[in-house]
Image (tube, rainbow, N blue to C red):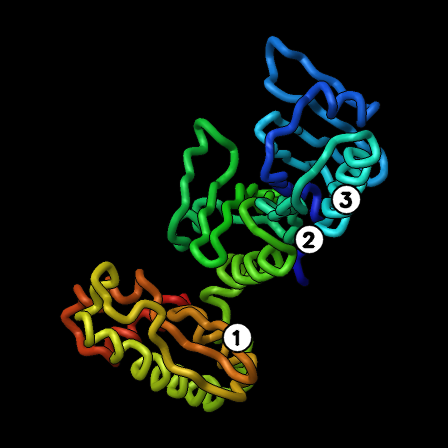
Amino acid sequence: MRAEIKICNVVASVDFRQRLPLSAVKKALPVVSSQKSRFPGVVVKLDRPKTANLIFSTGKMICTGSSSEYSARTAIRRLVSSLREGGVKLKEKPKVKIQNVVALINFRRSINLERAAKTLAGTIYEPEQFPGLIYQMEKPRTVAPLFSNGKAVRTGARNKAEVEAAVRRLERSLFFKGKTLRTVRSSKEAVENLEERVLKILEATYSLCDFCEYDCDSCPYPGLGIYLEKLEPPLLEALSILSRVEKHGKGFYIRPKREVSSYLKLSKEGLGSALASLLEASRT
């Protein structure tokens, strides 16, 4: 049951690289509202595509309200064309950059916020002040308020691909962590074989951390990992419990997790035994 993703707002910035006389802008664009005392610019609203555009005399503009990157760029092209037709001289082609893609997420299942606050790194959970959990993901760098009814809002992404990648990673963290090995229990032998393979790969991965003694803050090799090809889904899902699994080309990079490295540094057990303990704990 995959999460539903709906892009609801794309925010783009535009730099005309010159100052714009707002009086000329108002003459060129008929659908304009402005309030001098409160807002140092003008607001231009378009119906097709439906956007609100904030234009400033500094030559900057913000386009917001579109449901796709294509719609945002279409709105910007229409405004630039109207400005030129209205007599506003633009010396250069405006520079357009997508700043934020906001998406509504429906995981179609409930979320245990207390458990999520304990298992996810980078969360803020204060139910007395806010009914949801705020999760800050490092890669891709996005922020998402999560709610117990399975709904979420994802902000901070720069394109649709980043939104989808962030949602799929969050989905795995929320609903498949600790359940991976149960999905392959067709026989005791199959489970033991999978666990053995997982531990071998994890030992190879975290042995790399000896370079910096499991100290992520001073690690000279950020993002260091091992590259593997042709890994079946059960093995990938099991590895994602204690490592970062990232698709790359035809294979996958298996990289250390900061929280696991910190645990291994403090653990008095050997590497293999410590990882086995963590893996066993994730199954309960």
The quadrant of the image that shows the C terminus is bottom left
Closer to the observer: label 3 or label 1? Answer: 3
Determine the image quadrant of residue 226. bottom left
Figure check: 95 above or below 42: below
Q: Which amino acid lies under the numbered mark 3 shown in the image of this protein?
A: Arg
Name the one closer to the observer, 150 or 190: 150
Q: Residues within 10 Å of mark 1 (few under 14, many from 20)?
A: few
Name the one closer to the observer, 165 or 93: 93
- Confirm or deny contact between disc 3 and disc 2 (CB under 8 A): no
Compare marks 3 and 2 and give the one earlier in the sequence. 2
Figure check: 196 above or below 218: below
Determine the image quadrant of residue 81. top right
The residue that mark 1 highlights is 247
Tag 3 secondary structure = helix
Q: Which amino acid lies under the numbered mark 1 shown in the image of this protein?
A: Lys
Please indicate whether residue 127 sits to the left or right of residue 222 in the image: right
Q: CA distance from mark 3 to mark 2?
A: 27 Å
| Label placed on residue 5 | 2
Q: Image point 59% across, 39% down: which residue? A: 17
Q: Which amino acid lies under the numbered mark 2 shown in the image of this protein?
A: Ile
Res 126 seen here: yes
| Label placed on residue 77 | 3
